[in-house]
Amino acid sequence: MMPLPLTIALAHLAARKRQTVVSVLGVVLGVGMFISVSGLMAGFQATFRGQLIDSNPHITVTDEIRQPPAQPLAMLHPDAAVHLSRVLPRDPVRGISGAGAIVDALSAMPGVVAAPVLRGQMILRRAGRDFAVSASGIDPAREKQVTTLEKDMVAGTLDALGTRSDGIIIGASLATKMGAVLGDTVAVSTIAGTGVALRIVGLFRTGMEAQDNALAYVSLARQQSLQGRPRVVNEIQVRLADISRSIPVAAMIEGRWGFKAAPWEETFERILEVFVLQNVIIYGSTGSILIVAAFGIFNIISTVVMEKGRDIAIMRAVGIPGHVVVTIFVVEGSVVGVLGLLGGWAAGALIALVLAHIPAPGATDPSQTLKVVQSAFTYGLASGIALLSAVAAAWLPARKAARTDPLAIIRGAA
């Protein structure tokens, strides 16, 4: 036998079938849109984050010092009235000292791979036009272990840098601008005043225009020669088997060797902040649909309260407590919310399935479709908002009905 509040609540909902169905459909629409749109945005962020992080090292060690050492005079007289700043060595040597030993020590750690890099600016000249690029001197064998450069190659091979000392790899978009193809020669000059002709031995395409137009790769030895910095490395790229360890591993590297070690969370902090803002906008806009659906529930309960005023007065007169009256109408709202969220789960899963078969924008492969991430968190959040909105919408008019004086209602009806 059903409890009295549930029996009365179901009777009220059955008496107003059309309004009940409309309210349930409103919740279904809200929950379904919340699940599908949130899943689509989560899929986009996961894809973008994967492309961005997988194509870059998880930790970047540079020749910078996060906290510069204190000046000797300041250490000798910490309370002195004279403050000295910008006291630099006469001939500062930039670079990571002992880079080879650091790379070997990192690579010996389980789940850690490291590669040395020397970055510097280059000017590529072809057909009378100059193109400024950021060039990286790399060890091809180690580079393929820390980045996806080898997978991004669309012509030539990454290993060609190890067999040709005069080789250079550039972005396919940059090659198109230069009017160059694989095997062509470009004139290269650096700020060190060196110039040489290099042959294009590879083209890459990452899908990010900023990188495809502004990056170039040469062998580490060639870069050190061009930049006039023999045996110098100014960056160490680190890749982890477990990306979640990036922050503690970076802290360990910085604490042990002193050079600045930036985990990917720090490197791409601005992008992650954009993702947070996107989530706020998406959850806010889709959640507002559920709030609108709650007004439908509020309308039903308010109408029932007005129509059943005499019945409420009789229940109160025969001794039914006010909280039981509130429970009756809250149960009505809860029933609508539960039916709506169950239907919303099915609608959200169906919409997500349809979206997952739509080709991704700009995709050349038909198998590349929109990625939709369905998680228990999204379903739970949508359900929580739906139920909370439904209960709140039912509780407001129910609270008013429970506080009404039954004698005033009966006298008014008479």
Image: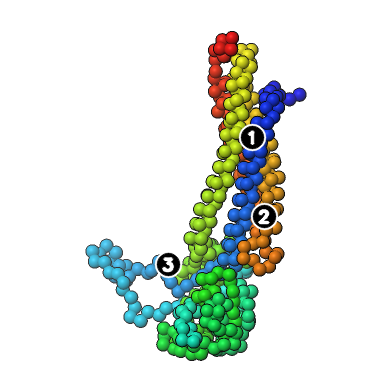
Which of discs 3 and 2 lies nearer the camera? The answer is 2
* Real-space Cα separation, disc 1 to disc 2, in angstroms: 26 Å
Q: Is residue 149 above or below residue 369?
A: below
Tell me the SS state at disc 1.
Answer: helix
Q: Of discs 1 and 3, which sits in the foreground? A: 1
Q: Is residue 94 visible?
A: yes
Crowd band around label 1 with a 10 angstrom C-alpha radius: few (<14), some (14–19), many (20+): many
Residue at which label 3 appears: 66
Residue 293: x, y in percent? 60, 37
The residue tagged 2 is 355
Q: Position of residue 40 (x, y in %)?
A: 62, 54
Instruction: Please report the residue visible at 61 percent of the width from the left and 21 percent of the height from the top.
Output: 307
- The C terminus - image quarter: top right
Residue 380 visible in the snapshot:
no
Q: Position of residue 88 (x, y in %)?
A: 33, 75
Q: Which quadrant of the figure has residue 18?
A: top right
**Residue nearest the observer in this picture, 180 or 187:** 180
3D distance between C-alphas at marks 1 and 3 = 58 Å
Q: Looking at the rendered structure, which numbered label has been put on residue 291?
A: none
Which amino acid does the dot numbered 1 rest on? Ser
Residue holding disc 1: 23
Sequence-first tag of 3 and 2: 3
Q: Amino acid at mark 2?
A: Leu
